[in-house]
Image: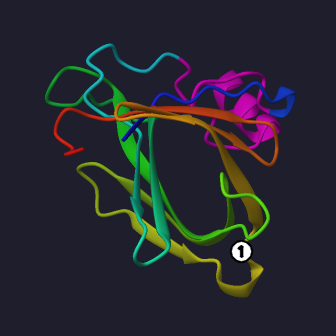
Amino acid sequence: MENQSYSNNPINNGRSNPILPQDIQDSLEDIGILNTNPTKDNTIKSTQSINLKKNRIRNVVAFELNNPLPTTNDDGSSTIKGFITVDVKGYPNSNDKRRIDVKFDSCRVSFLNSPIDITFPLGIVGPTGWLRTSYVDDDIRITRGHKGSVFILSRTSSNSK
């Protein structure tokens, strides 16, 4: 599913796909490292995949940084694109059939066209939380997180129903 998430959480300032805590993200945007207006080509999508048999959820969030070097990419842009991949274990909640309890397992940061690819295993220190599905049909799912975030996900045309 493609993540069309928006946060109504005041901690994240209502950002679309906030990727970092607000203070850090604001600072990186203010000094021009993190791009607040990603390129219009929209070639990078944020996605979520769920494997119910293995109780695994994978969220991939795209990001774009302004290149600090005086170089440009093949397409003439001066941005660096990458992904943050978060692997989560999810288990059905025994008291609420619409809720799953989650534990963050690992976080991976990778950059396109770069050898930088770092994985941080979170192990026993991985944060925990929950997600509660408010609405779901064949094409869309609306979920609320334990910190107030609302995630609206739409099925991509390449995924089977």
Q: Is residue 6 visible?
A: yes
Image position of 84 (left or right of 159): right
Q: Quadrant of residue 76?
A: top left
Query: Which residue corresponds to the image point at 16% horizontal and 23% vertical from the top-left?
Result: 75
Answer few, some or many: residues within 10 Å of disc 1's Cα (few below 14, many 20 plus, some between 14 and 19): some
Report the residue at 36% width, 39% height from top: 81
Q: Quadrant of the N terminus?
A: top left
The residue that mark 1 highlights is 126
Above-or-below relation of 85 to 94? above
Q: Secondary structure at mark 1?
A: loop
Q: Amino acid at mark 1?
A: Gly
Residue at (80% x, 30% y) in the render: 9
Magenta residue check for 22: yes
Taking the magenta stretch, the answer to whether it contains residue 91 is: no
The picture places residue 70, in percent across and down from the top left corner, at: 35, 29
- Is 143 placed left or right of 57 in the picture? right
Residue at 56% across / 30% down in the picture?
Answer: 5
Report the quarter where the C terminus lies. Answer: top left
Q: Between residue 141 and residue 39, name the one nearer to us.
A: 141
Q: Main secondary structure of the magenta part?
A: loop
Relative to 156, 94 lies left or right: right
Q: Position of residue 69 (x, y in %)?
A: 40, 35
How has the structure been colored for display? Answer: rainbow
Query: What range of the chain is rendered magenta?
Result: 12-36
